[in-house]
Amino acid sequence: MGQSTRRNGTRQRVPHARELGWDDSLYEDGPGDGPGPDGSAGGASGGKGPGDDSGSPADDSAAADGGDGSGSGSGKKRKGGPRRDGPRPRNRRGRRRILLWVSGALALLILGTAGAGYLYYRHLDGKLKKEDLTLGDKPMADHTANSAGQTPLNILLIGSDARDSKENQKLGGAKETFGGAPLADVQMLLHVSADRSNMSVVSMPRDTMLKMPKCTDPDTGEVYPASTVNVQTNESLGRGGPGCTVATWYELTGITIDHFMMIDFAGVVSMADAIGGVPVCVQENVHSRNAEGKGSGLKLEKGENVIQGEQALQWLRTRYGFEDGSDLARTHAQHMYMNSMVRELRKGAKLTDPGKLMSLAEAATDALTVDTGLGGVKKLYDLAEELKKVPTNRITMATMPNVYGEGAESGRVYPKPGDAEQLFTMVRDDVPLDGKASKRKPRPETTDPAAAPADTGVLVRNGTGSATQAPTSRRATAVAGLLVGEGYTKAVSDATPDPSERTEVLFPSADLEGDAQAVAKSLGIPVSSVKKSTDVSGVTLVVGADWRTGDTYPKSAAPDENKTPDTARALNGADESECMEIQPGFTW
């Protein structure tokens, strides 16, 4: 697109503006120039890093057209000492200031999402792809407001490995996967606190094994029954679209999810090109390509490199060459990239050119799929307004704590008993992951009165088993006996195994919440373990892997509700010291 020369402080005009449906006169600086009530300004950016495991549909053995991959070794090296922020851009009035805020705030959605819109938002609205947020036959939980009446905001960011277009096929993947069912190879839950003071991003490794909920494809109407065995979590996208991925997260975490945003390979590249480069650091020269041809093709020199385009996609896809060569290493690298991008854009030096921002808006809306509740540029702008309230040093990236499977599933991961649920509980209860003081009050006891123990029916299930250990024999019977001793004479055991990381007391409706809390207190189980669930028809105690033996609920099993587990590998958004460790055998 041609551009005129800037003179006398006016903004660049874009030819053919009126043909695109927006008002070129808005490019003039002037008093009171800001976003109108119709939301005719806004934006978002993002990308995603699909998987590259050998032998899976996301196999990266054919990820690059050439041996080294497109762009290998082309990262711009920065010279001199540590990176420092450049001078702050001048304070400008009106839309330019808003555009800078929007571009900086929505950079937080990189890997799983992109959206952009300003000035000609009606044109961009028509390009946004929208899908229903479906949860099968289960309703989404309601948010719990804080004392000020504010509610958190939870968005699931999904990176699809779909090879359903020439652009995506050109960027990698085994040819036999072209046109096949897409995989959700990047899944990150973005949580913005109710008071907008902090933000958490929790990644789930794509190798995580879970039971899938019942899902319905919104396009075809095909119903996918709930799985009876563990399935790799990235398969959720092919079982009913992004809504099924949302349902899978909700079933595991109990976290209310408001929206999803999804992007594909080509979207990552177009966003990275439009932004103009993100600095990353490696401890040694790295080339993600071994003798068997495994790897993303990424090739960088030791130290800091500025990457963009296909090379940014290679970084986000790399596992062979980083740390231990696992999907967990790739997740850590993705967090480093996200934090670095946020810092770069918040400096205000990347997207000050309206022409570049226009290109970003066009590319983003081409690549973006959102749920119908977020299906408009005005809504994306409003989202940006919420995200920009969070300072960089209050952003925390974390990975779901996990353990490796055994035997035939040694390459897969499972939620780590205790730690994973602790992380989910913190997000669910709006506790900051950065360890700073939380204004959250302990969960209050319900006002619903509890029935007498002798009048309360309780079903006890044995959830002590897991992927790595067999359940404790007759555990449900033993704990039911403890309840009988506390006066719950209607307590009975259920022999059906129901694996659970932590002991929980579940109830189906508000009129039984008081009964459920009374059951928990009778055995010393914390009130935070009492949850509403549509999977039960009455008060149900699931004895988890944290209480395999003994007559007393272990104090050590009740986690510190304000401490992020060390196994989550929390990374602060303002930390510029991170540099990726390189796997032996992948240096040059």
Image (tube, rainbow, N blue to C red):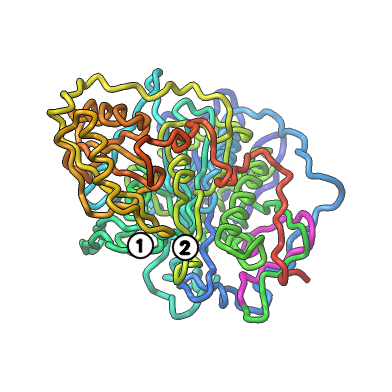
- Determine whether 60 is above or below 117 in the image: below
Mark yes or no: residue 368 visible: yes
Residue beneath label 1, please?
A: 230
- Determine whether 354 is above or below 29 in the image: below
Q: Dot 1 lies on which element?
A: loop
Q: Quadrant of residue 489?
A: top left
Tell me what residue is drawn at x 70 percent, y 46 percent. 5
- Determine whether 509 is above or below 577 in the image: above
Question: Alpha-carbon neighbours of circle 1 within 10 Å: few (<14), some, or many (≥20)?
Answer: few
Q: Is residue 533 left or right of residue 106?
A: left
Type of the residue with mark 2: Gly
Residue beneath label 2, please?
A: 405
Mark 1 or mark 2, which is nearer to you? Answer: 2
Mark yes or no: residue 366 visible: no
Q: Is residue 470 magenta?
A: no
Tell me what residue is drawn at x 14 percent, y 36 percent. 490
Residue 427 at x, y = what percent?
45, 37
Q: Is residue 118 left or right of residue 461?
A: right
Q: Name the quadrant of the N terminus.
A: bottom right
Tell me what residue is drawn at x 66 percent, y 46 percent. 340
Q: Residue furthest right?
A: 80
Type of the residue with mark 1: Asn
Stretch in magenta: 294-311
Residue situated in front as seen by the camera: 140 or 38: 140
Q: Name the quadrant of the C terminus.
A: bottom right
Residue 510 at x, y = what percent?
21, 29
Tell me what residue is drawn at x 68 percent, y 53 percent. 277
